[in-house]
Amino acid sequence: MSKEGSPPRKTDGPPEAKPERAKEPADPAAEESDHPAVEFGIAAIGEDDSAYLLRRTSPATIYVVSPAGEVTRTLKIDAGNKGLMPVALQVAEKELLIMFSDSTQHLIIAANPNTGEVQREYIGGNELGAAFGCYTDGEFYFVTADKGLLAISRAAPR
């Protein structure tokens, strides 16, 4: 009401702007996918057909997802050095093998896939290459480069 008791009159100007409500993301997981921990994540299938999903975090976080799509457990594997980040994952011979790396070394941790308990650790230099091919019969195979060509390198614990 104006001072004279009559309602305020409308002007021909632009309508008042209404404050916008914050928009909820349609899919919260979609926004999370821009995160490096998800972007550089790795998946492997275990002997029990469960998917092991590795997030690139320190310590490494691994979600075990059943064939029905349920997260059955979450494992945390610590490399013991914040500079080492998980770069590869294998599930072989009833073990979970996680390769951690920085600019100077690689660390491979063999862990129990049910509990995450560390069984063994292997340390190697950058000559191993960053691509962890496979693990079988106690030997590791890596994809490396040799004179501009791809090569397979075999490494065994001493």
Image (spheres, rainbow, N blue to C red):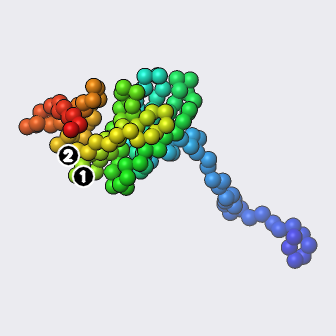
Give coordinates of residue 8: x percent, y percent.
83, 68
Give coordinates of residue 7: x percent, y percent.
87, 67
Question: In the visual, does 121 lie left or right of 147?
Answer: right
Report crowding for label 2: few under 14, some 14 to 19, many 20 or more residues within 10 A (C-alpha).
few
Picture layout, residue 66 above or below residue 38? above
Mark 1: secondary structure: loop
Disc 2 target residue: 126
What kind of residue is marked 1?
A: Ser
What kind of residue is marked 2?
A: Asn
Question: In the visual, does 140 lie left or right of 49?
Answer: left
User: What is the CA distance from the residue labelled 2 to the residue labelled 1?
Assistant: 8 Å
Residues tagged 2 and 1 counted as in contact (Cβ below 8 A): yes
Give coordinates of residue 130: x percent, y percent.
25, 40
| Residue 103 image label | 1
Picture layout, residue 7 above or below residue 96? below
The one nearer the camera, 120 or 100, is 120
Q: Which of marks 2 and 1 is nearer the N terminus?
A: 1
Tell me if residue 97 can be seen.
yes
The residue under the point 17% across, 33% down is 153
The one nearer the camera, 5 or 91, is 91
Quarter in which the C terminus is drawn: top left
Quarter in which the N terminus is drawn: bottom right
Mark 2: secondary structure: helix
The residue under the point 59% across, 41% down is 26
The residue under the point 56% across, 43% down is 28
Tell me if residue 34 can be seen.
no
Question: In the visual, does 126 lie left or right of 66?
Answer: left
